[in-house]
Amino acid sequence: MRKFIALTMALVMIFCLVFAGCENTETTTSANTEATTDAATEATTGATEGEQTAADIKIGFIFLHDENSTYDKNFIDAANAVKENLGLTDDQVIFKTNVPENSECYEAAADLADRGCNIVFADSFGHEPFMAQAAEEFPDVEFCHATGTTAHTAGLDNFHNAFASIYEGRYLAGIAAGMKLNEMIENGEFTAEEAKIGYVGAYTYAEVISGYTSFFLGARSVCPTATMEVQFTGSWYDETAEKEAANTLISRGCKLISQHADSMGAPTACETAGVPNVSYNGSTIAACPNTFIVSSRIDWTPYFEYIITCVQNGEEIAADWCGNIDTGSVVLTEVNEQAAAEGTAEAIEETTGKLASGELHVFDTSTFTVGGETLDSYMADVDTDADYTPDTEVIMDGYFHESEMRSAPYFDLRIDGITTLNEMY
Amino acid sequence: MNSTEKHKREPLLHIVKRDSIVWWKSWLIRILAVAVALIVCAFITVLLTGENPISVYATMIDGAFGTKRRIWSLFQNLAMLLCISLAVTPAFKMKFWNIGAEGQVLIGGLATASCMILFGELLPSVVLMPLIIVASIVAGAIWAVIPAFFRARWNTNETLFTLMMNYIAIQLVSFFSYIWSVPKGSGQIGVINSATEMGWLPSIGGHDYLLNILIVGALTIFMYVYLRYSKQGYEISVVGESENTARYIGIDVKKVIIRTMLISGAICGVAGLLLVSGTDHTITRDTAAGRGFTAIMVSWLAKFDPIYMVLTSFLIVFLQKGATEITTIFGFNSSFSDIITGIIIFFIIGSEFFINYTIKIHIPEKGGRA
C-alpha cells in the first residue's frame, strides 16, 4: 500500500512534467509570434513612441555572491543608490544573489526576463556566456554584463559589456601607498631600500596584472625605491587563501599590502599584523580601523543610470562601455587619516585632476621597463579568442592605451620591479 | 519531567521503542511534521516580512511552479539531485558511508569537459559522444573505487577517505579551470564548444532538460529493481545488516564493497556527464553545487528506497526553489532560504523519532489528576 501511494505520487509528478512539456511548446511558439509582433509594432511606432517613463523600467540584477563579498557589495550598493536616485519602486528592481557561473545564471536571467524586466544585469566575469545565451533568446530585453570581453565582437544588439578605467583608481591608491612608505622610511621604521609592497592577486589575468602594475606605478611615482611582490591565490574569492597570501607577504618583509581579490582575507590579516593596507572594492575601515588607508573602487551607479536612461529614451546601449574618473565611475573612498600619511588626500586630488585632463598617463612608457627595455610597441589580445592572439597595437603617443580599445583590461606586461612569487595561477 | 510524588519513582513520560507501526500512522506523523514545520516557517517569515503566511506559501509555490521555465528548472534540479541520491544509495544500504559523491560527480564532469575540450575539434560526433559517456562513467567509478579498495583491503575509514577525495577533485577542477581558461589566466573555462556544440547532449523536442530527466527516470527504475529484486541487491542488504553474517553465508564481502562502489561512482559519473554535457556546458568548482551532500539526506529520508527518493528530492528542490523566490520577492539575503529549508528538514528528520519511538504518558493511578 505504501509503495502504491509512493508510486502514484511519483506518477502524478511525471504527468505534471509531461503536461508542462506539452504546454511549453505551445507557449514558446505563441511567445515567439508575440515577440515578432511586438518587435514589428516597435519598429513602426519606435520613431514616435520610443520613449518610456521611469514607471516602465524594470531592472533585474544577478550577483555572484551577496553582501558578504566586497565585490558584490559594491554592485549591490550601486544598485540601491540608483534605485533611490531614480525613485524606482521595490517592484521595479529585482535582486538575485548567489547565482553561480553556470546554467543557473541563464535560468536566473531568463526568469528575470519572464518577470518583465527590460534590463538584466550580471556582475561576474563567468556569467558572460550565459547572459549571451539569454540575450539571444530575448531580443527585446537588454542584457548588460560587467567585466566581460565578448560583447563588442558578439554581434548581438541587446548584449553589452561594461567596465571602468579602474587602473587609474589603483594608480591613485598607489600614491597613497607610496606616501605611507615614505612616511615610514622617514620615521626610521625601515630603510628606503626595504620599501617593499605586497600584493595579493587572484589570477595572472590581465585585469589583475593591469591592477597591480598601475598600483605599483602610482606608489613608485612618489617612493622611487619601492619594489613589489605579488602572491596569487587562484581564486576570486577565497578568504583563507587571501589571508594566507597576505601573511606570506608580510613574513617576507612587505611593509604594505594591497589586494585584488574579493574577500576580507587580506585586510583582516593586515589588521592583525598591524601592516598598512590599501584596499579594493570599498572601505574596510570598520573591520580595519588602524591599518586601512584608502580603497579604490568602481562606482557602478553611473553605468546603471546610463543603461536605464538609454532604455527610457529608446537609445542604444553601447556594446562596450568604459567608465572613468569623469563619469564618476572610478572613485576612491575617504582616506583614513589615522593610518594614512599626512597630505594623502590632497596628493590624490591633485593627481586625479592630472589623470582626468590627460596630462598624466598611468602607463606612460617612460616610467617603466620590461626586461630592462622601454617599450614602443605592443600587440594586445583585445578581440577575445581561445588561442590568445595579439591583435591590436596599444602603445601609441608614449603610453599604453589601457581600456580604450575595449573596456575590460588587457595590460598584461610583466614590468621590472615587480616579482611574482607563484605564477602557477 | 519527573513526577513530584516521591513514593512513585516512575517518570511522567516514557519513551518506548515501537515494535512496528501501521503504515498510515507513520505517514500521518510525517505529514504532521511537515505541517508543523510549515507553521514554524510561516511564523518566522511573518515576523520578518509582515506578510500573511498564505501569501508566503503562495510565493513559494509560485517560485517552483510559477512559469513553464520554473517547472522545467524544478524538474531538472530534481533530476540531478535524484541522480546523485541514487548513486549514493547502494553504498549507504551497504553501510558504506560514501560522502564523496560531490567529488565523484566533479571528476565525472571533469572527464566530460576534458573530452569536449581536447577532442571537440578532432573527432566526429559519433565517436566523441560514446567517448565522453565512457570517460565520465569510468572517471566517477575510479574516484569511488579507490576508497572502496582501501576499505576492503585494509579496512580504512571510508568516511574520511571519501570526504578527502572530494577536496582533491575540487582542486583538480580548479587546476584545469586555470589551464583551459578562456581568456587565458581568467580561471574560467566558459561555455565549451559554444559554436560547434560538439560533445553537447542533444535536446529533445527543443527541451534542453528533457533528456536529463528521462535518463534519471530510467536510472531510478533500474536502481529500484536492482536493489529489490537482484541477487546483488540482496547481497548489499546482507552486507549492510552484518558483514559477519554475509561472510558466514558465503558472500565475498570485499567483492561486494568494491562492486557496489563501482556502481555508486559510475552513477555519480553519469551525474557529472549530465551536468557538464547536458546542462552547463562548462565546469567550475561549483558544478555539483553541494548536491553530493544533499543527496545523502535525500537517500536517508527515503530510507534508501529509490521510489520514495523521487518524493524526498522533490521536497528538497521545491523548498529550495520556493525559499529562493521568497528571498527574491522580499529582498532577503539568500541565507533565508537555507533557514527555511533547515527548519523543514529538521522537523522531517525529527518525525522519524516519533515513528520509531512512542511516548507513553504515565498517569498516576491514585490521586485526582485526570
Image (cartoon, coloured by chain):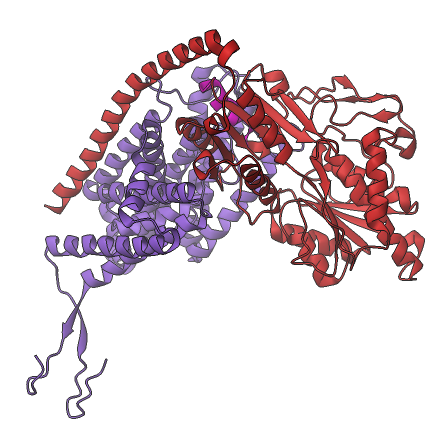
Count of numbered circles in the view: 0
- Quarter of the image with the N terminus of chain B in it: bottom left
Q: Is residue B190 magenta?
A: no
What residue appears at the point 81 percent right and 38 percent down from the top-left corner? A352
Magenta-colored span: A127-139
- Whether residue A274 appears in this view of the structure is yes
In this image, B158 relative to A173: left or right? Answer: left
- The red-tinted chain is A
- In the image, residue A128 lies in the stretch drawn in magenta: yes
The residue nearer to you, when weighing B21 against A260, is A260
Residue visible at 50% across and 52% down in the picture: B164
Residue located 12% across and 61% down the image: B20
Q: Which image quadrant is residue A205 in? A: top right
- Residue A308 quadrant: top right
Above/below status of B175 relative to A52: below
Q: Position of residue B271 (x, y in %)?
A: 39, 35
Q: In the image as oriented, which residue stretches furthest toward the top?
A: A44
The residue furthest bottom is B7
Q: Can see residue A204? A: no
* Residue in the image at 27% along x and 59% along y: B242
| Residue A147 percent across, percent down from the top left | 63, 31
Q: Judge by depth and name the residue closer to the eye, A308 or A396.
A: A308
Give how far across and how far down residue B94 sits, in percent.
30, 52
Q: Is residue A358 above or below residue A25?
A: below
Q: On the rendered image, what quadrant is the C terminus of chain B found in? A: bottom left
Q: Position of residue B14 (x, y in %)?
A: 18, 75
Q: Which chain has been coloured purple in this picture?
A: B
Q: Main secondary structure of the magenta part?
A: helix
